[in-house]
Amino acid sequence: MYTYRDSGVDIERGDSFSSFISHLSEVPPWLVREPTGYAAILNFTDPPIVLTTDGVGTKLILHQRYRRWRDAALDLIAMNYNDIVAAGGEPMAFVDYIGTPNINEELYEFAQELKRALRELNLYLVAGETAEMPGIYERHWDVVGFAVGRLVRRLPVEEISKGDAIIGLRSTGFHSNGWSLIRKIISQEGIDIESLPFDILAGTRIYKEVIQVLRNVKGVAHVTGGGLRRALRRLLKGKGYRLSIDRSPHYDWILRYVELEECFSTFNMGYGMLLFVEKSKVEEVSKILGGEIIGEVLDEGEERKIDYGG
């Protein structure tokens, strides 16, 4: 069976470095404490500004191979947009950085799709930078996004408690995480991705509708690096949980090559966003989002159980 670590990505090592970087970060008086780490909240305007950055990751290699510019644009936007939403914000402006061995036609095609997708979301590409660096980039180019939004509500994640419902919003598949592992499987197993019974390169779902319910939830988890387990840990800290998630074709497929617990710690398992809601507000939130209750929060020290297709 394959592991993420064997494909070159060590989640624990990444978490350790992230912790190191966070300790280097300065904490000015206008920085609002946001314990989940999805974005920074800057309180020198009214309303406060929410700021984040992220990239597509190695999925971009396959987007370039199959010329999937629309999906690459959705991945780039979503990794930033959804993080701002998870921090209680509404995205408004976007900046991009492209590092490339040379300027080529692919970049023009990608940039057009990026602008088109942003405008559909009422976002604006307000600035950007492109750097030709053949000494650093050789075969592939990379792109990073930066998103700015306004704070709708500082989510009270510290108030999440036993009995709160966990609402899951479906993903479009693997989204933009775990692709060093997926690419290794594809390569070593000789898999033709176009023969799979699902679109493995589908762009990440953008959870725009969640902005409507931010005032009625205690917390939002964008399920990205570190998978479902890490997303739950970011919001719940030491609290327990019990989840029951439906099977999906993407994960039935990947489980041929990866152990279930490894999947829980790498992929979103079919749910790209989790909302933590007190039971009295579940019906109202579900009516707007159409999500499904997939679990509940338990007390600190209680079990942390995920049942896949059960």
Image (cartoon, rainbow, N blue to C red):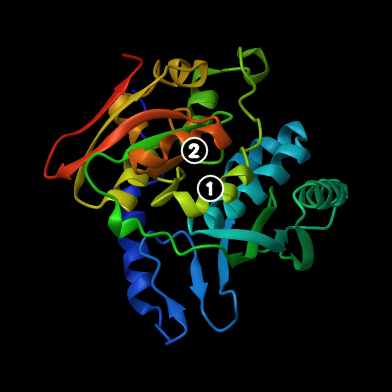
Disc 2, disc 1: CB below 8 Å?
Answer: yes
The disc at residue 142 is none
* The one of 176 and 41 positioned closer to us in this rendering: 41
Which dot, 2 or 1, sits closer to the camera? Answer: 2
Q: Amino acid at mark 1?
A: Val
Instruction: Say which residue label 2 marks.
Output: 284
Instruction: Residue 194 in the image: state x and y as whole percent.
Output: 68, 17
- Circle 1 crowding by C-alpha within 10 Å: few under 14, some 14–19, many from 20: some
Q: Quadrant of the C terminus?
A: top left
Q: Please report the residue visible at 57 percent of the width from the left and 17 percent of the height from the top.
A: 191
- Three-letter amino acid code at disc 2? Glu
Quarter holding the N terminus is top left
Q: Residue drawn at (33%, 51%), measured in percent from left and top?
A: 235
Q: CA distance from mark 2 to mark 1?
A: 9 Å
Residue 165 appears left or right of 225: left
The percent coordinates of residue 24 (x first, y second) are 36, 78
Q: Give the image location of residue 148, x and y in percent.
A: 64, 66
Where disc 1 sits, the SS reads helix
Q: Is residue 176 above or below residue 125?
A: above
Residue drawn at (34%, 56%) of the image: 157
Query: Is residue 243 visible to us here?
Result: yes
Residue 249, image x and y in percent? 51, 15
Which label's residue is closer to the chain start, 2 or 1? Answer: 1
**Extreme residue toward the bottom, this view:** 29
Q: Circle 2 sits in a helix, a strand or a loop, which is it?
A: helix
Q: Which residue is mark 1?
A: 213
